[in-house]
Image (spheres, helix red, strand yellow):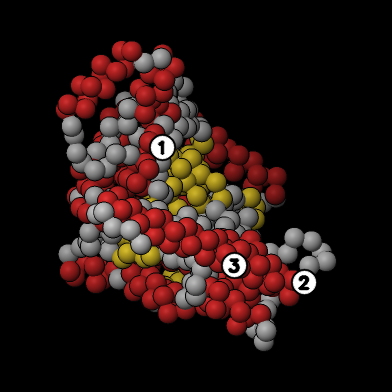
Amino acid sequence: MGIGEILSQVGSIMASIMFLYAMYEQFFPQHLRRNFLRHTNKLSTLFYPYIQIKFHELSGEKLKHSETYKIIQTYLNSNSTQGAKKLKAEVVKDSQTPLVLSMDDNEEIVDEYNGIKVWWSANHTTSKSQSFSYYPVSEEKRFLTLTFHKRNRDVITTSYIQHVLEEGKAITTNNRQLKLYTNNPSDDWWGYKSTKWSHTIFEHPARFETLAMEPEKKDEIINDLVKFKRGKEYYAKVGKAWKRGYLLFGPPGTGKSTMISAIANFMNYDVYDLELTTIKDNNELKRLLIDTSSKSIIVIEDIDCSLDLTGQRKEKNEKDDDKNDEKMDPIKKAEKEEQKKSKVTLSGLLNFIDGIWSACGSERIIIFTTNFVDKLDPALIRRGRMDKHIEMSYCGYEAFKVLARNYLDVEFHDELFPVIEKLLGEINMTPADVAENLMPKSVTEDSESCLKNLIQSLEIEMKKLEEEAEKEKVKANEKSEEKVKENGFTH
């Protein structure tokens, strides 16, 4: 039989199959076709020993991107794409490896787990639906298919998939760039592609190695953070939400914001900068909390200035304010009304950091900063809410040595370091002011001249302190003389 005859017979068979399929589509009712397919699938499972699980890219009521799909894709990209022959390249934002290779459509790769072989394939289908949706999505739907032998069903569904998800999450955490979030006003939350949080890449270079602080205090904070990061089982055992609160307090310029950045870089956590004044009520505060991710730091800076969190309500003052508002200038009145928009209460904030809703998510650090710790309600900063209180104090000699090493690459100076040590023991100067004096202002300045600039600034502050002490002494003497005269005595 020649090749021409073989091709002719194949063509005839194909035409017959297509004709029979067209007749089947035309004359078989829908319910009969469903029954036929169901029984066909049952028959095929008797002879086909493999099981398939599909993971779709879009899922849920509004077809949002599936986190599971992303995590599995990350795992496959890192562990299994070396065996793929067809790859596609993508530029991924917010990642330390912006060019990512993944298997192309209809490509299959093999993975192995405890001696068991499994097959992953990337597939897609094109939707024929013409319906209108308020949330428009691509007509192309992608999914990953996992195929394995049915005798390994228990191992794959319990151990292997969990292994893939854990490995994928770890790879994502290690490769991603940290993000700095800020909350949007609630008026901007609704609508297509609207979000409660906006973000940018977090690129602050602060590290504990460069933080101006006494080594013992620094080590204490680091050990506390390490203990928290490894505490998943411990927190579950004691029945507490896996979170920790830090209160950073001290004068302006003592490094509270730098400390937050150092913690974020050390823990590899995203930072959520929460602006309380843009939040209308306690319900919005809860919604923002739910929308934060695990492995993150939630920051409220200058909390004593953000809102009136004393928990006190004085009706008389409110009535007086209402009367005064009627006589107030329209512009000032509008400004006052703007300030009154936020109705977040102390109770709402307490529930946010320590209530039932605080357990939504895990591995979170909540940080408050304040310049005046005595202004805060004790209920807000008690242990259990703000677990660790860290005082950010004025620059001491050990902190100065860190700054000298950072800014000047100087470890010690025989003449100038002892002078600076003596002055810092007598003068309160913030690390920010010390750093400003140490930073070279021109190419001609060397390390010695910068150290002398610092000594000069400290001496000026010392002179001011002495002058103020002298003035206080004079005032005290004058008061003493007045009391003597009042009693009818003279010198």
- Name the mark on residue 196: 1
Label 2 or label 3, whichever comes before in sequence order: 2
Q: Is residue 340 above or below residue 413?
A: above
Q: Nearer the viewer, residue 179 or 221?
A: 221
Q: Nearer the viewer, mark 2 or mark 3?
A: 3
- Estimate the x, y position of residue 252 in percent, counting from the top left: 47, 55
User: What amino acid type is highlighted by mark number 3?
Assistant: Leu
User: Which mark, residue 458?
Assistant: 3
Of pointers 2 and 1, the one earlier in the residue sequence: 1
Looking at the rendered image, the disc whose residue lies closer to the viewer, 3 or 1, is 3
Q: Position of residue 3 (x, y in %)?
A: 70, 49
Disc 1: CA contacts within 10 A as few (<14), some (14-19) or many (>=20): some
Q: Nearer the viewer, residue 440 or 491?
A: 491
Residue 65 lies, with reference to residue 353, above or below; the image says: above
At mark 3, the secondary structure is helix
The answer to whether 483 appears left or right of 180 in the picture is left
Q: CA distance from mark 3 to mark 1?
A: 47 Å
**In this rendering, would 83 be left or right of 268?**
right
Dot 1 amino acid type: Lys
Residue where numbered disc 2 is placed:
446
> What percent of the width, then of the height, locates residue 24?
40, 30
- Residue that appears at 29% across and 68% down: 232
The number of numbered badges drawn on the structure is: 3
Amino acid under disc 2: Asp
Q: Quadrant of the C terminus?
A: bottom left
